[in-house]
Image (cartoon, helix red, strand yellow):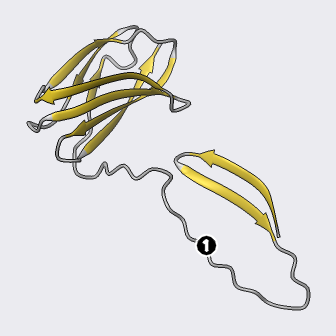
């Protein structure tokens, strides 16, 4: 058995393997698990506008819970903005000083709930 390919794509780690078996039938068990353990099912989607933006953007947070962290990642998953809050802002106004591209906005609450949105800078 040898590993042919290892790739990270769309939130999954994929491994392709080749197994040579002569004269036998074999069974292969495959277990898939997300590459990230972020739980986004308990907080509704962020409202981000204008989107696409040329700089200034407003991000509405659909909760009255306290915001723990506010992060923005570029497409290569590099953290480009991070702010720690201990407040309940219903919206955040930012001037995104980043090159053109697609960004992921992540808001984490004190209670562990997380919401993720997509931001496009043009």
In the image, what residue occupies the spot 87% across and 82% down?
A: 21
Total tally of numbered discs in the picture: 1
Relative side of 110 to 11, left or right? left
For the view shown, which residue lies furthest in the right direction? Answer: 22
> Residue 107's quadrant in the figure?
top left
Q: Residue at x 50, y 52 (%)?
A: 35
Residue 69: x and y, percent? Answer: 26, 32
Q: Quadrant of residue 4?
A: bottom right
**Dot 1 corresponds to which residue?**
30
- Residue at point 76% right, 53% down? 5
**Please, is residue 55 above or below residue 37 in the view?**
above
Quadrant in the picture for the N terminus: bottom right
Position of residue 67 measured from the top left corner of the image (x, y, whole percent): 18, 33
Q: SS of the residue at dot 1?
A: loop
- Please determine whether, in this image, residue 47 is positioned above or below residue 27: above
Query: Is residue 18 shown above or below 51?
Result: below
Q: Residues within 10 Å of mark 1 (few under 14, many from 20)?
A: few
**Extreme-bottom residue of the structure:** 24
Q: Position of residue 33 (x, y in %)?
A: 50, 62
Whether residue 17 sits left or right of residue 71 in the image: it is right
Q: As rendered, which of 78 and 25 lies closer to the eye?
A: 78
Q: Nearer the viewer, residue 35 or 120?
A: 35
| Residue 10 placement (x, y as % from top left) | 55, 45
Residue in view at x 90 percent, y 91 percent:
23
């Amino acid at each position: 058995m040898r590993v042919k390919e290892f790739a990270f794509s769309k939130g999954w780690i994929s491994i392709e393997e080749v197994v040579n078996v002569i004269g036998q039938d074999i069974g292969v068990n495959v277990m898939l698990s997300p590459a990230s353990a972020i739980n986004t099912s308990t907080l509704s989607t962020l409202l981000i506008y204008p989107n696409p933006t040329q700089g200034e953007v407003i991000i509405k947070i659909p909760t009255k819970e306290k915001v723990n962290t506010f992060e923005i990642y570029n497409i290569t998953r590099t953290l480009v903005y991070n702010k720690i809050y201990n407040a309940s802002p219903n919206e955040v106004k930012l001037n995104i000083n980043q090159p053109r591209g697609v960004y992921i906005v992540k808001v984490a609450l004190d209670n562990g709930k997380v919401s993720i949105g997509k931001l496009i800078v043009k």
